[in-house]
Amino acid sequence: MLKKYVLLDRDGVINHDSDAFIKSPQEWQPIEGSLEAIAQLNAQGFRVVVISNQSGLARGLFDEATLERIHEKMYASVREKGGDIEAIYICPHHARDLCECRKPKAGLLRQFALDKQVDLTQTVFIGDSLRDIEAAQCVGATPILVKTGKGQQTLRDNPQLSTSLFIFENLHDAAHYLITR
Ligand SMILES: [Mg+2]
Ligand SMILES: [Zn+2]
C-alpha cells in the first residue's frame, strides 16, 4: 500500500518560533490547533515526519541532549492529542558549514525518502519559510506555506509566492485541506 506522508517544518509550523531560538523544553510551545492537526492527519492515514534546521546546535545555544528533551516534549504533546510523529530529521549545522542537509538544500528530504522508500513527488511539505518551499521544490515535493511563524514575513519578502503556492493560515487549515481535497 502507498504510504502517504506529510512533512512538516517544526518552528513556526508546529510550535511558536523565536528569533532567539528554541533552546529548552519550556520555550517549546505549540501553536494553537497544530497538535490536533497532526492527529487528524494521522487519523486519515497520513504519516507525519518533521524536517528541521537546528543551527542552534552548531551555534552552541543548546546541546543534543537538550534537543532530545525538547522533542520528547513535542512527541508527548502530540501523543496526548492522539497523534504521532513518526520521525524527526535535523540539520545540526551552521549555514557557513555549507552542508548538504540545511534547507533550502534537500539533503534531509532525500534521506527521508531513502529511509522510508517514498516518492517525494507524492509528498507534501508544509513550512513557513522560503527555504522550506525551495527544498520541497528542489525534489519535486508539493510545498505548502503557512502564515504562522515567519510565514507572513515570507509572503511580504516574496510576494510572487502568493500566486504560485498553496497558502493557509496555519497547520490546522492546511491539514483540513489535505484531508478534504
Ligand atoms: Mg520554520
Ligand atoms: Zn546540515
Image: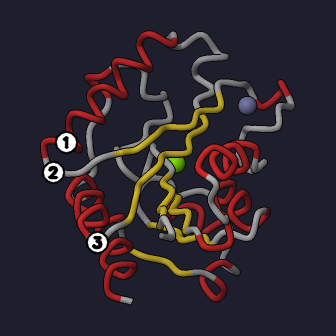
Contact (Cβ within 8 Å) of mark 1 with mark 2: yes
Q: Residue at x 54, y 71 (%)?
A: 144
Tag count: 3
Lower position in the chain sequence, tag 1 or tag 3: 3
Other residues around mark 2 within 10 Å, as few (<14) / some (14–19) / many (≥20): some
Q: Could you tell me which secondary element the residue under label 1 belongs to?
A: helix
Q: Position of residue 137 (x, y in %)?
A: 74, 68
Percent across and percent down for residue 70 are: 35, 24
Three-letter amino acid code at the position of disc 3: Gln
Which residue is located at x 36 percent, y 28 percent?
71
User: What amino acid does circle 1 point to?
Assistant: Arg
> What numbered label is drawn on residue 44?
3
Which picture quadrant has residue 121? bottom right
Outermost residue on the front side: it is 1
Q: Is 132 left or right of 99, judged from the image as shown?
A: left
Residue named by callout 1: 79
The image position of residue 112, as x and y in percent, is 63, 46
The secondary structure type at the circle numbered 3 is loop
Q: As drawn, is 75 to the left or to the right of 5?
A: left
Q: CA distance from mark 1 to mark 2?
A: 5 Å
Q: Residue at x 41, y 19 (%)?
A: 68
The front one of 113 and 16 is: 113
Q: CA distance from mark 3 to mark 2?
A: 12 Å
Looking at the rendered structure, the kind of residue marked 2 is Gly
Q: Earlier in the sequence, mark 3 or mark 2?
A: 3
**Which element is circle 2 on?**
loop
Toward which corner of the image does residue 34 lie, by quadrant? bottom left
Determine which residue is flagged by label 2: 82
Residue 18 or 45: which is nearer the viewer? 45
**The image quarter in which residue 89 lies:** top right
